[in-house]
């Protein structure tokens, strides 16, 4: 569970983002695909070119899920359970994508990035093991870029914790 100050910091930033959460989540996705191309393996059926309306639509969906999470910080596993089921059962996103994040609870979000390796190409079994942190990382970069005055080290730490909790909740659908 996030501390009271983490919760307050994340809520305050989200309030400031207002209707732009989708814009920034989309930028974060574009950055993830560009900086870490192996993350694209799950999205090959989408047009991933810069400015793509499909990426924008996906960004808005992820943004809405994040906003829902911000509104229910005390109850993330419950609120994100349908989404967790979707990733585990329907989309069959390899659980390794979410498990690495649990380990990262103990350390910085970028821990282990040097283990990064491209997808193995086996459907549903790609070794994309750092995608969640990569997306979280790119979201932090995006927000730091657009809100430099707000982005203190403390805010970064609070946001990082928040994103790790979201990913933990998404992982809860796996056996
Ligand atoms: Zn995911 C989808 C969220 C991560 C993969 N996603 C999705 C959606 C959402 C999300 C909201 C939509 C759903 C519907 O439609 O209903 N995710 C999310 C979040 C996160 C994530 C919040 C974190 C933070 N994902 C992820 C990862 C991966 C993924 C890591 C891999 C790797 N997703 C995915 C896919 C999909 C999704 C593949 C589908 C897409 C389409 O559209 O097709």
Image: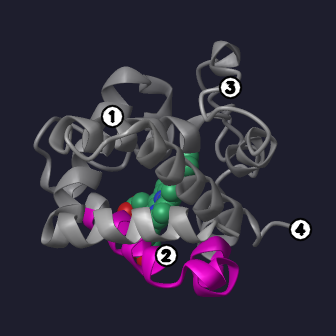
Residue 57 seen in this snapshot: no
Residue drawn at 37 percent across, 22 percent down: 35
Q: Main secondary structure of the magenta part?
A: helix
- Residue hosting label 2: 69
Q: Give left or right: position of 51 versus 174.
A: left
Q: Give left or right: position of 138 versus 132.
A: left
Q: Position of residue 152 (x, y in %)?
A: 36, 40
Residue 62 among magenta residues: yes
Residue 1 among magenta residues: no
* Location of residue 58 by image quarter: bottom left
Q: Position of residue 130 (x, y in %)?
A: 62, 34
- Residue hosting label 4: 175
Q: Quick check: is the Cβ at mark 2 less than 8 Å away from ligand 1?
A: yes
Instruction: State which mark lies toward you, 3 or 4.
Output: 3
Helix, strand or loop for disc 2: helix
What's the mark number on residue 141?
Answer: 1
Residue lying at the far right in this picture: please name it. Answer: 175
Residue range in magenta is 60-85
Q: Position of residue 162 (x, y in %)?
A: 55, 59
13 or 138, which lies in front? 13
Among the two numbered marks 3 and 2 on one chain, the one whose residue lies closer to the N terminus: 2
The residues tagged by marks 2 and 4 sit, at their Cα atoms, a distance apart of 22 Å
The residues tagged by marks 4 and 1 sit, at their Cα atoms, a distance apart of 32 Å
Helix, strand or loop for disc 1: helix
- Location of the N terminus (image quadrant): bottom right
- Residue hosting label 3: 111
């Amino acid at each position: 569970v996030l501390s009271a100050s983490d919760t307050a910091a994340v809520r305050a930033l989200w309030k400031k983002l207002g209707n732009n959460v989708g814009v920034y989540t989309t930028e974060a996705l574009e950055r993830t695909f560009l900086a870490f191309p192996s993350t694209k393996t799950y999205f090959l059926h989408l047009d991933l070119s810069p400015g793509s309306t499909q990426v924008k639509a996906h960004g808005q969906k992820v943004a809405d899920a994040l906003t829902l999470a911000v509104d229910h910080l005390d109850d993330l596993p419950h609120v994100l359970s349908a989404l967790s089921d979707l990733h585990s059962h329907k989309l069959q996103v390899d659980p390794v994508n979410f498990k690495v994040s649990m380990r990262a609870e103990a350390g910085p979000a970028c821990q282990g990035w040097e283990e990064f390796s491209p997808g193995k190409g086996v459907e549903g079994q790609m070794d994309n093991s750092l995608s969640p942190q990569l997306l979280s990382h790119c979201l932090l970069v995006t927000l730091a870029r657009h809100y430099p005055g707000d982005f203190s080290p403390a805010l970064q730490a609070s946001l990082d914790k928040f994103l790790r909790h979201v990913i933990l909740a998404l992982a809860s659908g796996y056996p």
